Amino acid sequence: MREAELEAAEKAKQTANILIPLGDSAKGAKLFQCHTVEKDGANKVGPKLHGLFGRQTGSVDGYAYTDANKQAGVTWDENTLVCTALRATVNHELTNSI
């Protein structure tokens, strides 16, 4: 069991390094203007992120999600997070190239 936990932790670390390069304080500052990561953190402009993996989209109590987000039925994990980040990047690039 311990080995499986270590492998999962290493995979999560690798995924995090892809999404948020180490030492990028500007990205961190932007993220934490909108979200908290503490267990008892409050929702801000975006919902709190504590316990994100394994949680369904649109499910944080007290956050005003769109109906589409509530009904998406997606469970957050490293794959859905990476896909969402890539989609946002592509949309941003397309918008800025028009």
Image (spheres, grey):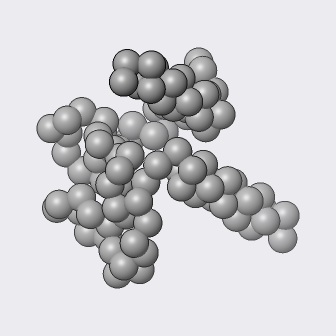
Residue 5 is left or right of residue 16, and the answer is left
Residue 78 is left or right of residue 75, and the answer is right
Provide residue 29's location: percent of width, then percent of height: 46, 32
Marker count (numbered): 0
Classify 39 as above or below 24: below
Residue 65 is left or right of residue 68, and the answer is left
Residue 43 is left or right of residue 49, and the answer is left
Classify 17 as above or below 62: above
Provide residue 1's location: percent of width, then percent of height: 36, 24
For the point 41% across and 60% down, which residue is it? 75
In the rendered image, which quarter contains the C terminus? bottom right
Q: Using the rendered view, name the quadrant where residue 50 is placed.
A: top left
- Residue furthest to the right in view is 97
Which is nearer the eye, 33 or 36? 36
Provide residue 24's location: percent of width, then percent of height: 59, 24
Classify 29 as above or below 95: above
Which is nearer the eye, 38 or 73? 73
Provide residue 47's location: percent of width, then percent of height: 31, 53
For the point 74% across and 59% down, which residue is it? 90
Q: Using the rendered view, name the quadrant where residue 83 is placed.
A: bottom right
For the point 34% across and 61% down, which residue is it? 56
For the point 33% across and 74% down, which residue is it? 70
